[in-house]
Image (cartoon, helix red, strand yellow):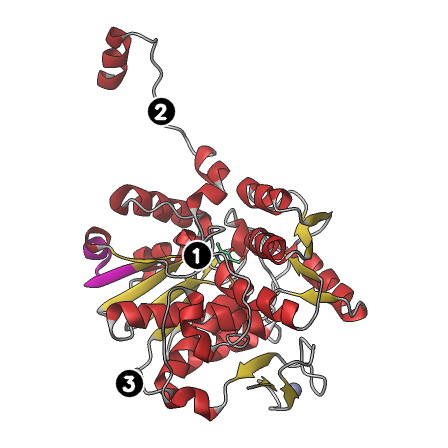
Amino acid sequence: MLQRCIACEATYPLDQVCYTCAACGGLLEVRLGAERFADPRFEGRGVWRYASMLPGGDGERVSLREGDTGLYRCDRLGAALGVKNLYIKNEGDNPTGSFKDRGMTVGVTWARRLGFKTVACASTGNTSASMAAFAARAGMRAIVLIPDGKIAMGKLAQAIVHGAEVVRIRGDFDDAMRLVRELSEADGAIYLLNSINPFRLEGQKTLAFEVVDSLGAPPDAVIAPMGNAGNISAIWKGFTELECARRIERLPRMIGAQAEHAAPIVRYLRESTQECRVANAETLATAIRIGAPVNWPKAVAAIRDSGGEANLVTDDEIIAAQRRLAREEGLFVEPASAAPIAYLARYGVTAETVVCVCTGHGLKDPDAVLRMPADTKVAEPTMASLRAALEA
Ligand SMILES: Cc1ncc(COP(=O)(O)O)c(C=O)c1O
Ligand SMILES: [Zn+2]
């Protein structure tokens, strides 16, 4: 195993701490040696079931029982949206309530193996919640930079309760990201755990492994929300590795959903803009409120190489999709996680089997629901009043 630049193919030893290529500044990825693909053995449960395909799989792990999330078949919603086999991969089932836990178990395990005692990240909320929990489990110090006033209450509460040092940056996520990169590059004692870190993405690729384990074959299409765009890249990497290992014979189309006013990748693909960046990104789906996605080259490659696509959905469509999934299928996901359903409702997808990646739990951000008109009723503590309320 080694690290390799996706742009110039320069390689670096696995244990070298570098977040981008020293030669060209490109993104790095972890490359497995050919022997890993010969006959991978999967045993146990969760993310570490796939240890033979993961860095750090052979040592002591920092784990909170991450992975093994539900893959829910949604026939009613599928019929309404024109998809024969619609599945939701419900990442809210993870220990801190989002897919980030898949990446953090590997990232924090790796940080400890490298001898770090401090980890850091910039976050729209879920990364900080997850990193704080895994750092606590490992007995490490956690520093998180968040955009002041722009992260959901549940996520902030998690970072605080797990004892992270929370710094509220008076700027947006992109400012926080820039600062934490500078901080960890300047201070050799701080390990950066944003998704620019390729070890984190290794953990996240296990979502693809689980989907194939559950369905027995890859789906035709996977739809994922895109923020910093690490997750869609990681999931694609997982599928391509299964193909290398001859566990699957075809690959799914990767489809990315972004919010209307935070859609740099959609614009980049559509308008061939020079830079993959939009100023002042805005959406009520705060998890994907990102204007300068760090992993855009990986995500663009995943979408193009898979014959996929990316499109935007409005905040109203996201909220409508969130309610629909909750009311028609019993799954409460946070707004960003409803973007793939909003995507299906707006654009449709010509595919028989579709997996929507619902990235985080709805309870992370109850305000997003309560801000909408509330249809609750009030009654006096008498049966007569209760009956009257129910009949009103
Ligand atoms: C719930 C949720 N969905 C989607 C995303 C976007 O993931 P990525 O940044 O890997 O594109 C995030 C990132 O914070 C998230 O928290
Ligand atoms: Zn390079």
Tell which residue pokes out farthest to the right in this image: 186
Q: Position of residue 24 (x, y in %)?
A: 69, 86
Task: Kindly identify which residue carries mark 3.
Answer: 249
Tell which residue pokes out farthest to the front in this image: 60
The residue that appears at 22% across and 17% down in the rendered structure is 391
Disc 2 element:
loop
Task: Kindly identify which residue carries mark 2.
Answer: 376
User: Taking 107 as reference, is 311 left or right?
Assistant: left
Q: Amino acid at mark 1?
A: Thr
> Would residue 267 be seen by someone viewing this image from the given angle?
no
User: Taking 159 as reference, is 386 left or right?
Assistant: left
Q: Position of residue 151 (x, y in %)?
A: 59, 46
Task: Kindly identify which residue carries mark 1.
Answer: 359
The residue that appears at 46% across and 59% down in the rendered structure is 99
User: Taking 210 as reference, is 7 left or right?
Assistant: right
Quadrant containing the N terminus is bottom right
Specify start and end residues of the magenta stretch as a single range. Answer: 78-87
Disc 1 element:
loop
Q: Which of the two residues, 162 or 253, is positioned nearer the viewer here?
A: 162
Using the image, determine if residue 248 lies above or below residue 113. below
Q: Earlier in the sequence, mark 2 or mark 1?
A: 1
Q: Which of the two residues, 21 or 40, is positioned nearer the viewer here?
A: 40
Q: Are marks 3 and 1 in contact (CB under 8 Å)?
A: no
Q: Earlier in the sequence, mark 3 or mark 1?
A: 3
Q: Position of residue 145 (x, y in %)?
A: 69, 53
Q: Earlier in the sequence, mark 3 or mark 2?
A: 3
Disc 2 vs disc 1: which is toward the camera?
A: 1
Residue 80 lies within the magenta run: yes
Quarter of the image where one finds residue 30: bottom right
The residue that appears at 53% across and 56% down in the rendered structure is 288
Q: Are marks 3 and 2 in contact (CB under 8 Å)?
A: no
Q: CA distance from mark 2 to mark 1?
A: 28 Å
